[in-house]
Image (spheres, helix red, strand yellow):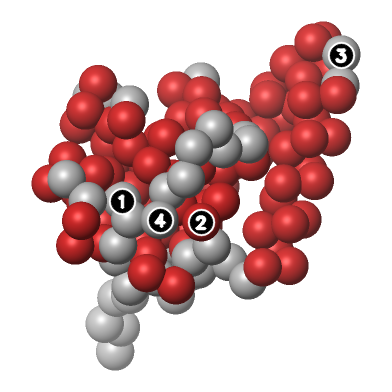
């Protein structure tokens, strides 16, 4: 459930409307903001103002996260940073569609995702043999 909360939080902040300008360069960010937004370091100075603002809004809450939540946040932000603009737009649309579902339907979707993740976690890693190799002569 925490994974879901962090994901929704990140997507919500990345799709919210700004309330003020966020034209700060990477070097002008506070150490805490830099820590929170580290996965975006290579892109920061080329991001549109709107996206910078959204990311800065998420960074405000970063210090309140547990170490596990911070790692999850960084992992998700790194994945987000690697998406193409088209993939980001598709993710935003999917998020908005999800929020339009009735609460019971959202819970069903969440449960299906949890089950899928559990099945995936139980599968052996690709390229790794499930049976040990023995030397038979």
Using the image, tell me which numbered label, if any, was put on residue 49: 2
Mark 4 and mark 2 in contact (Cβ < 8 Å)?
A: yes
Q: CA distance from mark 1 to mark 3?
A: 33 Å
Is 55 displayed left or right of 136 in the figure? Answer: right
Image quadrant assignment for residue 107: top right
Q: Position of residue 42 (x, y in %)?
A: 33, 73
Mark 4 falls on what kind of element? loop
**Which residue lies at the image location 47% right of the left edge and 45% below the top edge?**
21
Dot 1 corresponds to which residue?
A: 37
- Label whose residue precedes the other's in the sequence (1 or 4): 4
Q: Position of residue 41 (x, y in %)?
A: 29, 65
Q: Which mark is residue 102?
A: 3
**Label 1 neighbour load within 10 Å: few <14, some 14-19, many 20+:** many
The CA span between labels 1 and 4 is 15 Å
Name which of mark 1 and mark 3 comes first in the sequence: 1
Residue 45, picture quadrant: bottom left
- Label 4 belongs to which residue? 23
Q: Is residue 3 above or below residue 47?
A: above
Do the numbered discs 2 and 3 sit on residues whose CB atoms are within 8 Å? no
Mark in the foreground, 2 or 3: 2
Q: Identify the residue at horizontal 38%, vertical 42% (top origin).
A: 56
Q: Earlier in the sequence, mark 2 or mark 1?
A: 1
Q: Position of residue 112 (x, y in %)?
A: 72, 30
Q: Which mark is residue 48?
A: none
Q: In the picture, which quadrant includes the C terminus?
A: bottom left
């Amino acid at each position: 459930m925490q994974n879901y909360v962090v994901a929704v939080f990140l997507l919500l902040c990345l799709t919210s409307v700004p309330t003020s300008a966020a034209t700060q360069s990477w070097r002008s960010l506070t150490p805490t903001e830099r820590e929170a937004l580290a996965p975006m370091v290579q892109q920061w100075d080329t991001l549109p103002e709107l996206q910078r603002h959204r990311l800065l809004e998420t960074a405000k809450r970063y210090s309140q996260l547990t170490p596990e939540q911070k790692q999850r946040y960084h992992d998700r932000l790194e994945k987000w940073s690697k998406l193409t603009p088209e993939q980001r737009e598709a993710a935003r649309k999917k998020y908005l569609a999800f929020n339009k579902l009735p609460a019971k339907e959202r819970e069903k979707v969440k449960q299906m995702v949890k089950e899928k993740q559990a099945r995936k976690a139980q599968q052996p890693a690709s390229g790794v043999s499930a049976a040990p190799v023995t030397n038979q002569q």
